[in-house]
Amino acid sequence: MDIREMGTPITASQRRSYREAPDSSFYATFQTAFAAQKAAAADGQTANAAGSLEQVLGITHTELSALRGVSAESQASYAAVLNKAYSADGMDNARQFLATLTAQELDAVRQNHCLADPIDTASLSEEGAANLLLPEGYGVDLNRDGIEEVGLARTMHFPPRDAPAAVKEAWFQATANMDEGSMMTYGLMLHDAVYGLQIDGHSQAPRYAVDSSDGYRQLVSDYLAALEANRGFLASGQYERDKQFFTRLQNLLEAGQVAQT
């Protein structure tokens, strides 16, 4: 599934640093792909294993698995767990479903989400459990606090999935030729600006409207103003880098607003 609604395809780094919510067709599409893979295996077809897994789990999951050294066998076991969950309404109570899995199945889930410790289902929130039952590239934020729990891990991405399509497009264009580290740094800066810092594990109310283009234009304008106000206190080269990036993002956001009117 393409997370952009317009423009050219995003880069691999952009895709791997973003999660989209599964839409109404996601689960049926997954089950169809899984059934096709199983039928092909039963017929003795020798399709490329990596390509077959990509059809089922998605390119983001298989790319990250390759980077992390997760075997094709482990990915296939994880796909079978997901198919079992989606076939038995396991997503309705993800934590309860995970508790029914064997130790081997839970370890496949652990490996595919790159978790260091064995999964203790009793310690998971429902959101943390649900995200373990979604392949990389997908996620849910059940309490809409801007933080996605994956197992016990707490993760974030920018722009928020509730952001307008024009805002996502502006972000992907602004970061298209950026190295992954810089892109993640700017994403964290903007995420923290929107949601604020967590206090005792709880997020503050968003300081900018996450579903409005006006909120993001104001956010970028505020960053540019702060940049000018603090220019004399910045490290060498930071002003120039940040000025260039935020000015480009501002122009793209303005262009997106004009295109929508």
Image (cartoon, rainbow, N blue to C red):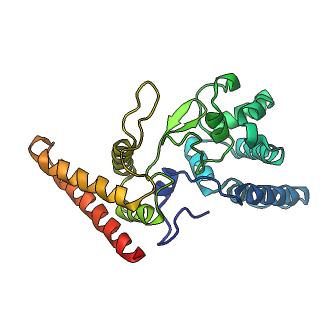
Q: Nearer the viewer, residue 53 or 191?
A: 191
Q: Residue at x 69, y 26 (%)?
A: 121
Residue 60 in picture, x, y percent from top left:
58, 54
Question: In the image, is 142 to the left or to the right of 104?
Answer: left
Give the number of marks: 0
Dividing the picture into quadrants, the one containing residue 153 is top right
Q: Is residue 224 visible?
A: yes
Residue drawn 71% across the image and 32% down it: 95
Judge left or right: residue 110 versus residue 148: right
Q: Quarter of the image for the N terminus: give it.
A: bottom right
Residue 149 lies in quadrant: top right
Percent x, y of residue 104: 77, 31
Instruction: Using the image as rendered, state which of residue 11 and residue 259 is in the foreground.
Output: 259
Residue 116 lies, with reference to residue 161, above or below; the image says above
Residue furthest right as drawn: 43
Q: Where in the figure is residue 173, as x and y percent of width and height? A: 38, 65
> Which of the pair 25/82 is nearer the observer?
25
